[in-house]
């Protein structure tokens, strides 16, 4: 039975290889974990709101004008 190839994971901050069994996973170290936390806290990372589908927006506009 052939083995599956190992998934190569990298730290999102410094791009060093990381094992899924590491204590700081998905980061390579506590330093990279804190850098990532600082980026979230400072607003460097942003989750955008969902974009409306243009077809839905047009149908909503038409239905609001029909009243």
Image (tube, rainbow, N blue to C red):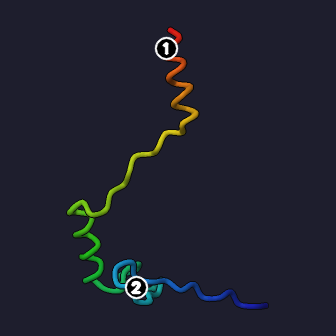
Sooner in the amino-acid sequence: mark 2 or mark 1: 2
Q: Quadrant of residue 7?
A: bottom right
Pointer 1 local density, CA inside 10 Å: few below 14, some 14–19, many at least 20? few
Write down the residue under mark 2: 15
Query: Residue 65 got which mark?
Result: 1
Residue drawn at the location 49% of the way across and 39% of the way down:
52
Pointer 2 local density, CA inside 10 Å: few below 14, some 14–19, many at least 20? few
Q: Quadrant of residue 45?
A: bottom left
In the image: residue 62, left or right of residue 13 = right
Q: Whole-percent x and y of residue 9?
A: 49, 83
Residue drawn at the location 41% of the way across and 78% of the way down:
26
Residue drawn at the location 50% of the way across and 23% of the way down:
61
Picture quarter with the N terminus: bottom right
Q: CA distance from mark 2 to mark 1?
A: 53 Å
Q: Whole-percent x and y of residue 48?
A: 38, 51
Residue drawn at the location 27% of the way across and 63% of the way down:
44
In the image: residue 44, left or right of residue 66 = left
In the image: residue 64, left or right of residue 46 = right
Instruction: Give SS at disc 1.
Output: helix
| Dot in front, 2 or 1 | 1
- Between residue 49 and residue 31, name the one nearer to us: 49
Residue ranking furthest to the top: 67
Instruction: Give SS at disc 2.
Output: loop
Q: Whole-percent x and y of residue 41?
A: 22, 63
Residue 53 drawn above or below residue 9: above
């Amino acid at each position: 039975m052939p083995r599956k190839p190992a998934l190569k994971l990298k730290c999102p901050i410094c791009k060093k290889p990381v094992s899924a069994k590491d204590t700081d996973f998905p980061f390579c170290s506590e330093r990279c974990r804190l850098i990532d936390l600082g980026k979230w806290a400072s607003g460097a990372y942003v989750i955008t709101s969902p974009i409306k589908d243009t077809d839905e927006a047009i149908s909503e506009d038409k239905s609001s004008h029909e009243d």
